[in-house]
Amino acid sequence: MSSLAQPGTAAGALVLDAEALYADLLHSLRPLITPHTHLLGVASGGVWLAERLHADLALSQPFGVISSAMHRDDYARRGMTASTQATRIDFDVNGAQVLLLDDVLFTGRTIRAVLNELFDFGRPASVKLAVLVDRGGRELPLTADVCAARITLPASQSLALARSANGQFSFNVKDI
């Protein structure tokens, strides 16, 4: 069995090893990072990834935070998300090479929303997407450039990155 998944408590359940997935993501991203790459984390799990990658890669330029709240196509149904992080981009987006980071890619609607938000700030030269987990279920034609794991979960379950007080990553799976 891979270091990425361990037997769960329920028969057939898998527990994803978020720390091992993070190590894989870090390894995959190292060769893609240039002095001109700007990390932009999707609130909130993506921000945690951006913050940790920024430190582990010893990047000098600041990383940013991007929120999907104002561009969601389901805003009327969902309202404001649980995250209170607002968009904060401390670099010139025009002509920038942006590495967009998120914890879980599912329908693609969050990524569509953050791309709309990003383009409100300017026109980047390129945008690449890196995620810890792609869980399938896409509703929009989006894919990650870098992905540490691909899994399948029923639509009735949600998967979200969690971070402990000491900065360790784990995943929460919930029935919705």
Image (cartoon, helix red, strand yellow):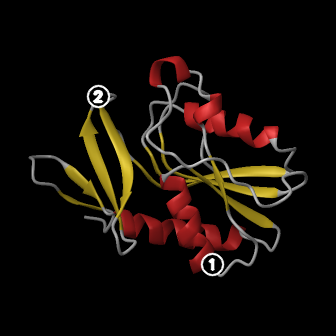
User: Quick check: 171 above or below 17?
Assistant: above
Which residue corresponds to mark 1?
57
Residue 16 shown left or right of residue 136 in the figure: left
Which residue corresponds to mark 2?
156
Displayed quadrant of residue 21? bottom left
Residue 160 in the image, given as x and y percentages of width and height: 38, 48
Q: Residue at x 84, y 52 (%)?
A: 93
Q: Residue at x 74, y 55 (%)?
A: 89
Q: Residue at x 75, y 50 (%)?
A: 127
Residue 121 in the image, given as x and y percentages of width and height: 82, 44
Amino acid type at circle 2 is: Ser
The residue tagged with tag 2: helix, strand or loop?
loop
Residue 162 in the image, given as x and y percentages of width and height: 36, 57
- Residue 63 or residue 124, whichever sits in front: 63
Amino acid type at circle 1 is: Leu
Residue 82 in the image, given as x and y percentages of width and height: 43, 40
Displayed quadrant of residue 176? top left
The residue tagged with tag 1: helix, strand or loop?
loop
| Real-space CA distance between mark 2 and mark 1, rounded to the nearest whole angstrom | 36 Å
Is residue 25 in view from this perspective?
yes
Residue 88 shown left or right of residue 156 in the figure: right
Query: What residue occupies the far bottom of the structure in this picture?
Result: 58
